[in-house]
């Protein structure tokens, strides 16, 4: 795999290059930069497809070696000083070859799953309401408020804050419908309720939640009644039974069909 050419660019130079590409007004040297970008992408794709190169060596190939530390410099000096006058390789060279071979062996081994940190990530909260909060005074490419020549660029990964609050298992919404009355004929005109509901209405989600808490989680109706009453959304036990029964009526055809199919089985005679 050919090592791609390294070209260092700052964000302003990258933005200027993208603008020249969009306007089709390339300058001298732009071709080399674009070619280096393409070579880097090809190099990464080949490395991922072959799976024969470690991440450490891949980063070194693409971005070059990091600043040498004292231990690395002293190690290199020791290896140079240990070379024999005849030009033979020193034992340290053999060790490096062994390390390279061990790297190759490790590359062929399947990656081990890293241990978790014990916290639940934000992507697990699939039922949470999500909102995006913009920065109060900074926008993309605005001047940096701390340094005179810098610019603030928007990051792809935003900061995440999770706020968890409590509410009743069944939540109620009261709609106050405006009424108007004619001063001559006395006719009263009332605004329409959402969904044209009348009185107290339990939708399908409320009925399903009652059934899940009772038969799925073993939550007694009387205990649910006390909990809902303490949270300001009364739900009598008798009402819970009625709503569960009305929801069960919808699935009786499926229940009867399951019984019919079970009766045709030949396991029990």
Image (cartoon, rainbow, N blue to C red):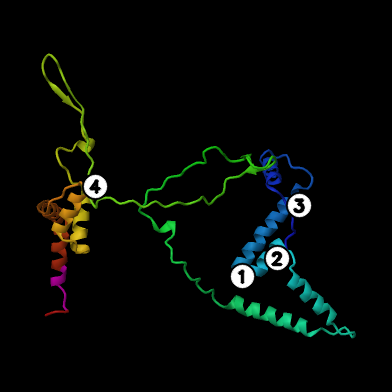
Say which label, 2 or 3, has the lower sequence index.
3
What residue would you read off at disc 2? Answer: 61
Q: Are marks 2 and 1 in contact (CB under 8 Å)?
A: no
The answer to whether 255 appears left or right of 103 in the picture is: left
Name the residue at the top extreme: 184
Query: Does residue 262 show up magenta in the picture?
Result: yes
Say which label, 4 or 2, has the lower sequence index.
2
Q: Secondary structure at mark 1?
A: helix
* Front of the two marks 1 and 4: 4
The magenta segment: 261-266
Count of numbered marks: 4
Which image quarter is the C terminus in?
bottom left
Say which label, 3 or 4, has the lower sequence index.
3
C-alpha distance separating marks 2 and 3:
18 Å
C-alpha distance separating marks 2 and 1:
15 Å
Say which label, 3 or 1, has the lower sequence index.
3
Q: Tell me where residue 127 appears, x and y as whole percent.
A: 35, 53
C-alpha distance separating marks 4 and 2:
58 Å
Q: Secondary structure at mark 4?
A: loop
Residue 42 position by quadrant: bottom right
* Front of the two marks 2 and 3: 2
Q: Look at 83% across and 78% down and name the residue there.
A: 80
């Amino acid at each position: 795999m050919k090592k791609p050419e390294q070209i260092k660019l700052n964000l302003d130079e990258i933005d200027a290059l993208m603008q020249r590409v969009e306007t089709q007004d390339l300058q001298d040297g732009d071709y080399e930069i674009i070619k280096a970008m393409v070579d880097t992408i090809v190099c990464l794709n080949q490395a991922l497809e072959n799976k024969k190169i470690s991440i450490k060596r891949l980063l070194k190939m693409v971005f070059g070696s990091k600043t040498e530390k004292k231990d690395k410099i002293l190690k290199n000096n020791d290896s140079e000083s240990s070379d024999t006058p005849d030009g033979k390789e020193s034992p340290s060279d053999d060790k490096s070859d062994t390390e390279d071979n061990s790297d190759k062996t490790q590359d062929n081994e399947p990656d081990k799953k890293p241990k978790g940190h014990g916290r639940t990530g934000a992507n697990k909260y699939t039922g949470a309401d999500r909102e995006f909060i913009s920065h109060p005074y900074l926008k993309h490419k605005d001047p940096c408020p701390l340094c005179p020549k810098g610019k603030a660029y928007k990051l792809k990964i935003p900061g995440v804050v999770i706020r968890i609050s409590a509410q009743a298992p069944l939540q109620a919404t009261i709609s106050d419908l405006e009424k108007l009355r004619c001063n001559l004929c006395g006719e009263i005109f009332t605004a329409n309720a959402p969904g044209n509901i009348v009185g107290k209405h339990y939708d399908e989600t409320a009925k399903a939640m009652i059934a899940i808490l009772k038969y799925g989680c073993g939550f007694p109706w009387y205990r649910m009644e006390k909990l809902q009453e303490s949270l300001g959304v009364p739900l009598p036990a008798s009402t819970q039974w009625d709503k569960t029964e009305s929801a069960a009526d919808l699935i009786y055809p499926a229940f009867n069909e399951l019984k019919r199919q079970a009766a045709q089985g030949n396991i029990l005679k």
